[in-house]
Image: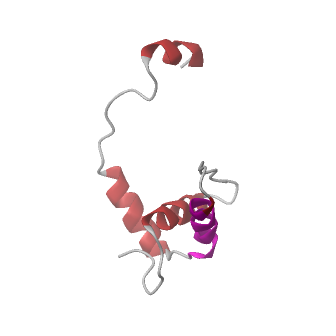
Amino acid sequence: MPATGVSATPAQIALAWLLAQKPWISPIPGTTKLHRLEENIGAARVELTKEEVALITEEANKLQVVGSRYIESIEKTTGL
């Protein structure tokens, strides 16, 4: 289990994993709820080991992403 010995929510672990990728990555989670913002900020205190980061990465790489990111009319405006 990632973040061994640390009480962290799944959202905090996900954000901590993003923060561990590169020093210039700054995740900007969106929320309209103060308690979620406070939860997200708490991710900065979660320190994952290299082994935990590798395990999360390995498991994430097993996921198959399906479907479009945007509906077709919006996708056309992205230039992708």
From the viewer's perspective, is 34 left or right of 64?
right
4 w.r.t. 14: above or below: below
Q: Quadrant for residue 5, please give it.
A: bottom left
From the viewer's perspective, is 2 left or right of 40?
left
Magenta-drawn stretch, dominant element (helix, strand or loop) = helix
Which residue in the rendered view is the most extreme toward the bottom? Answer: 5
Which residue in the rendered view is the most extreme toward the right? Answer: 24
68 w.r.t. 15: above or below: above
The colour scheme used to paint the residues is: secondary structure
Q: Position of residue 46 (x, y in %)?
A: 56, 75
Q: Give the residue drawn at x 33%, y 29%.
A: 67
Q: Position of residue 69 (x, y in %)?
A: 44, 29
Q: Position of residue 10 (x, y in %)?
A: 43, 65
Q: Quadrant for residue 22, please give it.
A: bottom right
From the viewer's perspective, is 18 left or right of 25?
left
Residue numbers of the magenta segment: 35-46
Q: How many marks?
A: 0
Does the magenta segment cover residue 41?
yes
- Image quadrant holding the N terminus, namely bottom left
Task: Name the one closer to the observer, 13 or 50.
Answer: 13
Task: Name the one closer to the observer, 21 or 69.
Answer: 69
Q: Position of residue 26 (x, y in %)?
A: 67, 54
Q: Give the residue drawn at x 42%, y 83%.
A: 4
Task: Name the one closer to the observer, 31 or 26.
Answer: 31
38 w.r.t. 73: above or below: below
Q: Give the residue drawn at x 59%, y 55%.
A: 33
Does the magenta segment cover residue 71?
no
